[in-house]
């Protein structure tokens, strides 16, 4: 019998019933799917990244399954910030877990316009790491000062601001600038820029040529990045994302320094994955003879 343990964590002022968060992705544009994730045990939901105006994304094919994960070249398709704001309002009326809105913007002014339309969210996440969209995402990390300026703009809305980092580039330097500008926490990592080639057709598989690699293949990279971020910024809350398929991967990220963990690609197997991860963590904490999962955050550094 599993002893009673406390899985609650505090994430930059957000009170989470457990450390499992749905990471930004296609699920975050459907109220029905978000509600199902909540009922399955998710402690917070990150919405699909919103841009100021609607985006159609890249041409098909946009997803390619590999033995060790997924390649996606969605191209940030979304209905635009105005519609995403309406979705947030509807979700807040029926959901009880925090909603984190994901923002993509090329300038502080654009970020303010997006955030204004997403005011109902409990927190904001700046997507500074999407690897397959020009002018947005990972290209922001080439200009740490721009990231800092956008963070400052988002902070004016009085919500916690998280910055989602890529494992490409100087992510420690970008994190330092973002935190100096008032970022409340960090999210690491996003998908890794990758591609696949059809050897028969002799051309790239994905319609957008390049895609983001997610799933088990990137998990060791995510663990390393979270570990190094926690070592540099031990008091900063981190959401660890990348290849979380079971409670074991979730526990690794927590031991590396993550306060919470994001799940995305694993949900292709069904929403039951969330409950399995939560219960696995509960059993793990109990088996270690601990009262709270908070005692394990960053334990690999001790």
Image (cartoon, grey):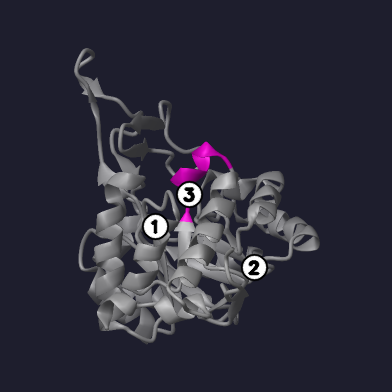
How far apart, in angstroms, are the residues tagged by discs 3 and 2? 17 Å
Q: Is residue 111 visible?
A: no
| Label 2, label 1: how far apart the Cα atoms are | 24 Å
Q: Specify the farthest residue to the front.
A: 1
- Indicate whether 48 appears above or below 69: below
Q: Mark 3 and mark 1: span between their CA atoms?
A: 16 Å
Q: Is residue 128 left or right of residue 172?
A: right
- Say whether residue 21 is magenta: no
The x and y percentages for residue 30 are 66, 45
Horizontally, residue 4 falls left or right of residue 150, namely right
Q: Residues within 10 Å of mark 2 (few under 14, many from 20)?
A: many
Residues rendered magenta in the picture: 263-270
Question: Which residue is disc 2 drawn over?
Answer: 98
| Label 3 secondary element | loop
Residue position marked by numbered label 1 in the rendering: 248
The disc, 3 or 2, on the residue closer to the chain's N-terminal end is: 2
92 versus 272 height, above or below: below
> Up-down: is 193 above or below 125?
above
Q: Which mark is residue 264?
A: 3
Judged by its main secondary structure, the magenta piece is helix
Residue at x 41% of width, y 77% of height: 296
């Amino acid at each position: 019998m599993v002893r009673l343990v406390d899985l609650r964590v505090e994430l930059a002022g957000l009170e989470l019933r457990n450390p499992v968060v749905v990471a930004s992705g296609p699920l975050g544009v459907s109220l029905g799917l978000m509600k199902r994730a909540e009922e399955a045990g998710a402690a917070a939901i990150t919405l699909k990244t919103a841009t100021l105006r609607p985006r159609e994304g890249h041409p098909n094919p946009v997803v390619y399954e590999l033995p060790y994960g997924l390649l996606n070249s969605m191209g940030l398709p979304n209905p635009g910030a105005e519609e995403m704001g309406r979705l947030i309002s509807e979700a807040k009326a029926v959901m009880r877990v925090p909603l984190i809105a994901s923002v993509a913007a090329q300038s502080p002014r654009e970020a303010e316009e997006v955030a204004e339309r997403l005011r109902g969210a409990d927190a904001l996440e700046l997507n500074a790491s999407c690897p397959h969209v020009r002018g947005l995402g990972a290209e922001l990390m080439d200009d740490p000062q721009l990231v800092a300026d956008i963070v400052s703009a988002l902070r004016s809305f009085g919500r916690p601001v998280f910055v989602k980092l890529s494992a490409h580039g100087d992510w420690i330097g970008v994190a330092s600038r973002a935190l100096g500008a008032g970022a409340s926490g960090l999210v690491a990592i996003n998908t890794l820029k990758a591609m696949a080639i059809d050897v028969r057709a002799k051309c790239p598989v994905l319609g957008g040529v390049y895609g983001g690699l997610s799933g088990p293949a990137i998990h060791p990279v995510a663990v390393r990045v979270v570990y190094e971020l926690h070592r540099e910024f031990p008091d900063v809350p981190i959401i660890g994302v990348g290849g979380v398929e079971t409670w074991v991967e979730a526990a690794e990220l927590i031991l590396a320094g993550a306060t919470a963990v994001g799940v995305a690609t694993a949900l292709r197997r069904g929403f039951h994955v969330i409950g399995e991860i939560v219960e696995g963590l509960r059993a793990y904490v109990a088996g270690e003879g601990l009262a709270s999962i908070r005692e394990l955050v960053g334990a690999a550094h001790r």
